[in-house]
Amino acid sequence: MLNKGNQQEKHSHFSDAEIVREENDFIKTYTEKKSGAFKILFKLYRTHKWKLLLSALFYAIKVSPTWVLPIITANLINIAVAQPADTVTQIIINVAVAVGVLMLNIPFHMLHVKYFSIARRNVEAGLRGAMIRKLQQLSISFHKEMQSGKIQSKVMRDVEAVEALSSQIFNTVLDVLLSMSVTIAVVVSKNIIVFLIFLITIPVAVLTMLPFKKSMRKENHLFRQEMESTSSKVMDMVELVPITRAHALENDEIEKLTGQVTNVARRGYQLDMIQSLFGSVSWVIFNVFQVLCLVCSIVLAVNGEIEIGDVSLYQTYFTSLVAKVSGIVALLPIITKGTESVHSIGEILSSFDVEDYKGKQKMTTLRGEYEFRNICFHYADDDRMVLNNLNLKINPGETIALVGESGSGKTTIINMAIGFFRPTEGDMFIDGKNSKDLDLQSYRKHIAVVPQNTILFSGTIRDNITYGRTNVSDEEVMAAVEAANLKQVIAKLPDGLNTSIGEHGDKLSGGQRQRISIARAIIRKPDVIIFDEATSALDTVSEAEIQSAINNLTRDKTTFIVAHRLSTIRNADKIAVMRDGRCVEYGTYDDLMAKKGEFYTYKTMQS
């Protein structure tokens, strides 16, 4: 029953629907007109203002002993010096009050943490969810330009830094405001001279921060960039371990990564030294003021202007005030790091390079007619035309094979057919409709892609085959398995379809991974199929076996095939020979062989 109750409570504080609302709000916050880091941070917490107010109230109650105990201490000292007739009674009353306020700490501390943690963890989950949501919306071009290691660093490390910033700001600023309010109220009511000494500490704190602010911001920015670069290079190193080991390049990788982590250490050292100097200077200044306050209160006591017990009161309050103000000063490194992370997250959430299909025509059916009309394309950072005045027409149900040297534009045509790239000039028509006017997300539901580099995720074979499909029957799965020539492979595995394939399918051979990718395409029952070197990882026997399955799959379906093995496209309806972004030959296999042009040359070289 306890577990059930806790589970219900957990769901009431952290619901998926609430997180989704926050994800959308956070994306909107970042894509609105540019705001400062603190304004953004404030907006992130605006839906949790009541939780923060409750947390602040409980915090004020739980720290009340720090304000009450100095007064009681001063009272007890004054009682000991004056020794009134009811000394014992007054001592008992003061001790009882002290114990009472101390006992308040436990329940109200838990309540303070509860409500602040709910707000903080929801914002943390919302930020990460917003980044994941935005990453799914951003264009393929964005993902090609930003390394996956940097993205991982932003999603994990930067969100953690923002969470730490919000936590430190809330607790420290709240603590300082409450302490200053109570301290000033008590001190002003007792002695205005001591109050003026207290007051000087505020501008001193501000002046202490100013010389260090700019340099710490700069070093934090450089340190973050170095960390992101290191994260990306470590991921590359892990991916390349088989290649590195195969070519005995371990020492080269070690040397390269050692140099990178050394750069991080150097940059971190520079940041540490600036923060250390800042902390040391502020500590000395505040403690000098504390000594001055002690001297001043002793002089006032000697002159009879205050009681002896008040010396302890003022010193305790000033010590507390100095500690709180020092806490704000010490926040500067955390603030600098946190604000840098706020802007780092903005590199994803504020990006406008998204696939936006609002108002575009949705595609409920797909016949598979394509026309590339005067298409030119180049990448944003390169003026060289990858496709140059390309004209192609593919009729519904036709299989078109794209052949040519590397860099001739074959894969770019495939990416354009998927909708990853948009023409720089010219137009692509799908079923007679300009692709610029179509909701390509709805279009992609009708296609299946088998890439050259098989992309699998950690999980079972069944999970990878049925990816993106729900309520798939065992019969459908087995039909896809058989069509992809996977049946004998799965029969030999201990757990069959439920066999875990390891990270990226590392427990399988290249051919087995490719067949899973083909089975994934088959089970989608697509109207258009795109093969990018789909048989490249298969041996000759497996290639022959699976080719018939591909032919059955592609019957009466529009199919794009990129192939270097020209024997695999013998039955294609049309073959387009690409060179320098242009289609230089176009026709059937027999036509092109009879022509004895470029295709004939390629085929002769492979024979």
Image (spheres, helix red, strand yellow):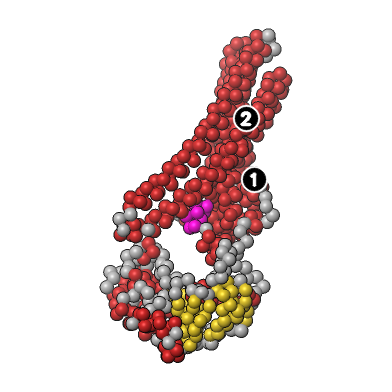
At x 43%, y 83%, the residue is: 599
What span is colored magenta in the figure?
Answer: 147-155
Residue type marked 1? Phe
Task: Mark 1: give few (<14), some (14-19) or many (20+) Cα within 10 Å.
Answer: some
Work out whether residue 497 or residue 9 is closer to the camera in this orientation and state it: 497
Which of the 4 image quadrants contains residue 80? top right
Give the structural element (helix, strand or loop) at label 1: helix
- Total label count? 2
Q: CA distance from mark 2 to mark 1?
A: 21 Å
Look at label 2 and name its amino acid.
Thr
Q: Could you tell me if residue 548 is visible in this image?
A: yes
Considering only vertical position in the picture, is 265 above or below 486?
above
Report if residue 296 lies within the magenta region: no
Where residue 117 sits in the image (x, y, percent)?
55, 46
Q: Which residue is mark 1?
A: 38
Specify the label residue 467 is tagged with: none
